[in-house]
Image (cartoon, helix red, strand yellow):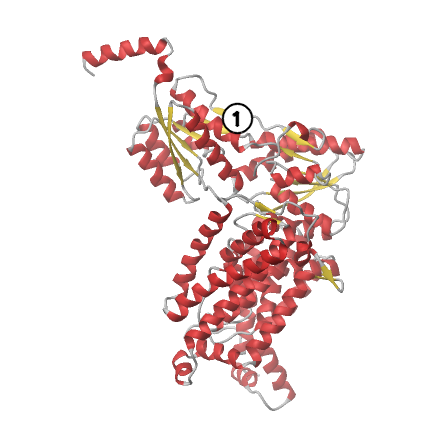
Amino acid sequence: MNIRSMLAATTAAGIALAGAATAQEYTIGITQNNVGVDSYQTTYEKAFIAAAEANPDVQAVVLDAGGDVARQIAQMEDLIQQEVDAIIIWPTNGEAVIPVVRQASQADIPVIVTNSNIAEQGFDFIASFSGPDNITQGSRSAEIMCDKFKELGIEDEAQIVQISGQPGYTTAIERAQGFEERLPEVCPNVTLVETQPGDWNREKSQQVMEAFLVKYDDIDGVYSGDDNMGVGALNAAKAAGRDGIIFVGATNFAVGYEAMAAGDYWGSIYQSPVDDAEAALQTAIDVLNDEEVPFLNYFDTPKITQDNMDEFEKPVF
Amino acid sequence: MSEAAQERSARNAGGSSGAKVGTFLAKQGILIAFVLFMVSFALASERFLDPDNILGVIRSSAILGVMALGVTFVVISGNLDLSVGSLMSFSTIVVLDLHDTLGPALAILAMFGMTLAIGAVIGFLVGYLRLNSLIVTLGMLSAIHGLTLTWSGGQNMDIADKAGTWFAVFGQGRALGIPMPILMFALLAAVLGIVLAKTPFGRKVYAVGGNGTAATFSGIRRARTVFTCYLISAFCVATAGLIQASRSMGSQNTVGQGMELEVLAAVILGGASLMGGSGTIFKTVIGVLILGFIQNGLLLIGLQFYVQFVVTWIIIILAVWLDIAAKRGRLLSPIA
């Protein structure tokens, strides 16, 4: 850097102190996991583009890996080549993307991970993680379930089953972990008799629940890793004529919201893809503005039950 | 009895009643495997043979089963169809979306029309352009997925007014106490079983898959036969999509993802040859039921699910081996 540009930089810094930082335009690249695979990701992308367009200081480069790790790595390399100011990544695989994240960090491009985190070995190379706290979601679901059992007076004998997400998927593991750890703390006498995966798939979950209903004469509650699977389980219970089961899920979907309104489904966790997308973009902007950002920057995902659902808008996905 | 004698008696069609039993066993190896493992599951879990459970398993296998019926035709004709899972997602999403705009009857008609049109495209590419069916349907697998996503915009599709429509009848209704999906599966299996075993068209399918050149010299229009097989497959897929949509009254875009391999596994498990020329509808149905009951049985036993993947594979390999061993009349047959 020669003297002239140093002078220019100092002057610019002086002006920036006066609030001109907003006048700077940032190019922010995002590579998403698999848009179109589900409504959450589709809505996320729309919200992200809308938020970026609404912000005159941001120029967004929006890419989608289509669930393919190799393609995501290539997209990361492209973004590094383009010398964008920051990269947001929704990892297709928490382990496999670490080398290319490291490459970005070596090129001095801050990387923000969104929605589901990368593996811990990669934490040195990222500026921040922005997304939901799935362990807290799991424990909140346990609380919702337990509170309802207490209200019904069955907290000392209730038996429940769990339908978890795709085996090996971080979100599935963390939600199950949060639920299984919290439940004995709040309702020590409730028994979790069995857990089987529903693979985030409504039909698969319905089949699993059918088998549970045959196997157990007494099921008081079902915890599902998301509402899509929860509604599958509910369908199975309805078809078998088994009433009075308390269904609790996570990631409130429109179908779950409707089932709650109909009184069939007790509660869930409200996780908005719009909040998720906006939080990711804001985290990136804050990092670029050198503001202090928590390393794990969670956005809030509140409890929603039949009792308070009026406070929430029906999810669009 | 020596090994050679056993093999001889298994092959010998006429003669003593012992030889007849041998022939029967040799032909029905897969049936024996099925009975064997039904008995072992029943011993492991007393709920397994509960009539509700049996009906439940057959009902949830019906979707896979209906698809497997069509693929049986395609496989016997010497081709593959890897696009059925993706096509099933398409028909499910389409019928659910059109339901709210056109009403149930028209939506079903339109969905069958579109699904058959896609089947015709595949049939044309494989039958008339003679392109490799593996490549064509593998490509179709992702092309149709793209089509589905474009149609839905990636959103889940749900019927708005679930209570105010008769659409639920195909997936959730019952007739004579039997769930509709089972009846549709049984009816389709019966009709297609007769078509394959008793009609001139059925014999053409075997001929084309068994020895294409000989079929041509016998005056069989191979292209037309293959084309028709893909139409039958598409019709079955559309029926499966209808059951699926009606069963859950809503769907993700990926509902059929991965089913193409399960379908193929069921067909091959039933004993159809990947080289074409052999297989029956009845055995495919057995293959489908084996897959369905494995899944259900393992759940009822309460095996940890990481282990289930491994056990499922072991059971499939056992079943295939029993089938082959019965045909050959001996347990071991090293590659010579």
Picture coordinates of residue B279, whole percent (x, y): 53, 74
Please state, as top left, top right, bottom left or bottom right, where the C terminus of chain A lies in the image.
top right
Label 1 marks which chain's residue?
Answer: A
Vertical side of A107 occupied by B15: above or below: below
Picture coordinates of residue B79, whole percent (x, y): 44, 69
Q: Identify the residue at horizontal 76%, vertical 65% (top origin).
A: B176
Q: Is residue B27 visible?
A: yes
Picture coordinates of residue B77, whole percent (x, y): 46, 73
Vertical side of B16 occupied by A217: above or below: above
Q: In the figure, residue B21 lies in which quadrant? A: bottom right
Sort mark 1 into few (<14), some (14-19) or many (20+) by Cα contacts within 10 Å.
some
Q: Circle 1 is placed at which residue position?
A: A298
Q: In the figure, residue A71 lies in which quadrant? A: top left
Camera-nearest residue between A182 and A148: A148
Q: Amino acid at mark 1?
A: Tyr
**Most distant residue in the bottom direction:** B15
Q: Identify the residue at horizontal 70%, vertical 49% (top origin).
A: B164
Relative to B164, is A52 on the left or the right?
A: left
Q: Identify the residue at horizontal 69%, vertical 37% (top origin).
A: A260
Picture coordinates of residue B328, whole percent (x, y): 52, 78
Relative to B169, is B268 on the left or the right?
A: left
Q: Secondary structure at mark 1?
A: strand
Vertical side of A203 occupied by A273: above or below: above
Q: Identify the residue at horizontal 52%, vertical 31% (top origin).
A: A274
